[in-house]
Image (cartoon, rainbow, N blue to C red):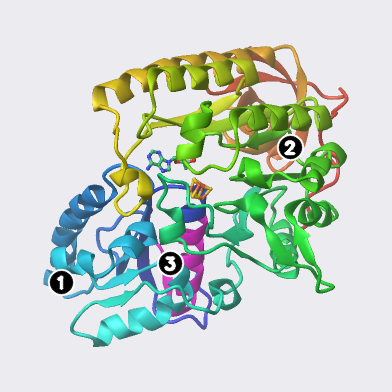
Amino acid sequence: MTDTAAAPARKRLFIRTWGCQMNVYDSARMADVLAPLGYAPAETPEGADMVILNTCHIREKASEKLFSELGRLRAVKRRREQAGGRMVLAVAGCVAQAEGAEITARAPWVDIVLGPQTYHRLPEMVARAARAAGAVIETDFPVEAKFDHLPEAAGGQGITAFLTVQEGCDKFCSFCVVPYTRGAEFSRPAAAVLAEARRLVAQGAREITLLGQNVNAYHGEAPDGATWGLGRLLRALAEIPGLSRLRYTTSHPRDMDEELIGAHRDLPMLMPFLHLPVQSGSDRVLAAMNRGHTAAGYRRLAERLRAARPDLALSSDFIVGHPGETAADFEATLALVREVGFAQAFSFKYSPRPGTPAAGAPHQVPEVEKEARLATLQALLREQQEGFNRSRVGMTMPVLFTGTGRHEGQIVGRSPWLQPVHLRGPASLIGRIAPVRIAAAHPNSLSGLLAAGEAVRHDQREEEPAPA
Ligand code: 5AD
Ligand code: SF4
């Protein structure tokens, strides 16, 4: 990124990001907010004028990780001061939201603690931190939406881009901190989403992934004042010239409505890969988790989605060892996995999050049992993922090329199912979609050969040049 002539003296900004894609997106937006103050990205915290730790609280030992990193940064900050400089140290994200002043009590060398809804106020906080003797702490959920106050993204995100359309969650799953750290469900107006999407495409994006903690709960204000669900929003986004692919994550089975399923049937550019967390295959555990759906409901949903889009592959999240989970409940999870079949999945041991209902629930599952169940589940999921990858061998599929590979002459792209695809080919294909014949499957990727001239089935507009 370059500074403009009008920008103040160049300062160095280092951001470390933990957790989900939402945090990655938020980190980019914090960099955008700070750019007009002269902050440009730095590769390391050493010598930086500002360091932001963007934290995640969703599982295990988030605060221990944070405090050990803060311990290291204390020394970096001290060296910077000894050299006559200053380093502003900020803690952002969900741990900041959850722990607030606790952080500066334990690490008084932290200058700013800011929750996820306050990023647009960062310049003001930096100015206050420069003046104040104590730390600046901002963890309210302000009434005004931060999105209205964030500047337009500066440099663009490249060929594949993320766009936050929704934040927060009102579902209150028994195990989850998100409703407490990210606050109530909020959807951005459709016009703002469409404008940001057009900008991303103008900056070179060919694929956009819509983000939200509960993205399919989206209910944004439409340009005509009505309310649009995610299916309707996707239809509008699909009209943007130059955009070739759409995805969205993360969804809740309860919010998968007819219109959204219809979008999977009607929009070829909506990629046939859906992350739809089920968490467990046992109705007892799903009820204890307050998920609001049953295992049979999830199976039916998978069938309806596949009826709408036959090549659709599913991905999921699982938690093993939720309080009260018996061996039989865990068997039900394995049965669901075998029946539904997943192309990819994330699985976790239940980890008690302070303040959530499950943390204080009786019948906590012993650690060794959680470990054994996780190993069993992961072996099955790995087998399914490898089987899915192998099932692509011999297929010709459209690949969106995103960059060069590690080896000379190699380029890398992504398949419609989000698998990385490696092959030998010209760098001129980067930013374009071309058909690839898959020759080999690996545990986490595919490789193949350019199949010029062959028909591409999945993408609508593979030959349209990216706009300048
Ligand atoms: N323990 C373990 N896994 C959790 N997740 C959320 N909270 C917890 C927890 N307390 C998992 C869920 C969710 C994913 C993002 O993280 O599976 O879908
Ligand atoms: Fe957490 Fe459940 Fe909301 Fe997902 S739906 S963010 S797991 S409370």
Q: Residues within 10 Å of mark 3 (few under 14, many from 20)?
A: many
Q: Earlier in the sequence, mark 3 or mark 1?
A: 3
Report how far apart the C-alphas of labels 2 and 1 lie in the structure. 50 Å
Residue 82, x across and y down, in percent: 11, 70
Q: Is residue 364 magenta?
A: no
Where is 234 relative to 98, above or below?
above
**Residue 267 appears left or right of 135:** right
Secondary structure mostly taken by the magenta-highlighted segment of the chain:
helix
**Residue 298 appears left or right of 113:** right
- The residue located at (46%, 32%) in the rendering is 285
Residue bearing the label numbered 2: 271
Residue bearing the label numbered 3: 40
The mark closer to the camera, 2 or 1, is 2
What are the residue bounds of the magenta stretch? 25-41
Residue bearing the label numbered 1: 81
**Residue 91 appears left or right of 291:** left
